[in-house]
Image (cartoon, helix red, strand yellow):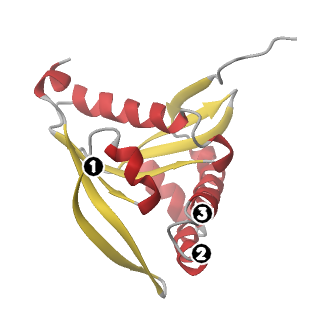
């Protein structure tokens, strides 16, 4: 028997057959990881964005979407909705805090810098603020949006990518 001290994460592009798994990760993440910051009604409205699996899959396929796996199982994903905008970014609650989110974000930042992107922005949920602050993002503005009958708040954050990062 062999024990591993660290999980073996891998990164790959989104595949169409990933959509049901990513929808489940999205729902589980919203429902379980945001309960300290959003009401049950807000979380239910937010999670409903994955109910239309075809629309969810089309959104993922339309953008650069990277998938994190652990020993071959899908555990998280991130999408770059434009050259500068992080869209969807979720890790399954069972894998949260183990490094998959950092791996996903770091990959997007490296890709963006290699493409010469001057900055990245994200509309961060309240529970994701510390993650993005720790990576050099600064809050730009507070937002409220209607999702069904609920209002959900987030914060637009921005990080300038240094010229030397973009040149590497």
Q: Earlier in the sequence, mark 3 or mark 1?
A: 3
Vertical position of residue 69 compared to residue 8: above or below: below
Left or right of residue 8: residue 146: left
Q: Cα distance, mark 2 to mark 1?
A: 27 Å
Mark nearer the viewer, 2 or 3: 2
Q: Position of residue 93 (x, y in %)?
A: 64, 49
Mark nearer the viewer, 2 or 1: 2
- Residue with the mark numbered 3: 53
Please identify the quarter of the rendering in which residue 108 is found.
Answer: top left
* Disc 2 crowd, CA 10 A, few/some/many (<14, 14-19, 20+): some
Mark nearer the viewer, 3 or 1: 1
In the image, which disc is placed on residue 44?
2
Left or right of residue 17: residue 164: left
Residue furthest top in the image: 2
In the image, which disc is placed on residue 105?
none
Tell me the quarter of the image containing the C terminus. top left
Tell me the quarter of the image containing the N terminus. top right
Q: Residue at x 56, y 35 (%)?
A: 68
Vertical position of residue 9 compared to residue 57: above or below: above
* Disc 3 crowd, CA 10 A, few/some/many (<14, 14-19, 20+): some
User: Disc 1 on helix, strand or loop?
Assistant: loop
Q: Position of residue 36 (x, y in %)?
A: 55, 65
In the image, which disc is placed on residue 82?
1
Q: Earlier in the sequence, mark 2 or mark 3?
A: 2
Left or right of residue 92: residue 141: left
Q: Residue at x 62, y 64 (%)?
A: 31
* Disc 1 crowd, CA 10 A, few/some/many (<14, 14-19, 20+): few
Q: Earlier in the sequence, mark 2 or mark 1?
A: 2
User: Disc 2 on helix, strand or loop?
Assistant: helix
């Amino acid at each position: 028997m062999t024990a591993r001290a660290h999980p073996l994460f891998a990164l790959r592009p989104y595949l169409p057959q990933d959509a049901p798994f990513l929808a489940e990760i999205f729902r589980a993440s919203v429902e379980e990881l945001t309960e300290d910051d959003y009401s049950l009604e807000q979380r239910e409205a937010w999670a409903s964005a994955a109910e239309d699996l075809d629309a969810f899959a089309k959104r993922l396929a339309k953008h650069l979407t990277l998938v994190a796996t652990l020993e071959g199982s899908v555990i998280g994903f991130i999408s770059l909705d434009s050259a500068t905008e992080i869209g969807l970014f979720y890790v399954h609650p069972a894998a949260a805090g183990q490094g998959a989110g950092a791996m996903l974000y770091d990959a997007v930042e490296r890709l963006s810098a290699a493409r010469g992107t001057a900055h990245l922005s994200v509309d961060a949920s309240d529970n994701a603020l510390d993650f993005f602050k720790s990576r050099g993002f600064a809050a730009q503005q507070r937002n409220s949006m209607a999702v069904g009958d609920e209002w959900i708040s987030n914060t637009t954050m921005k990080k300038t990518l240094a010229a030397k990062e973009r040149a590497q």
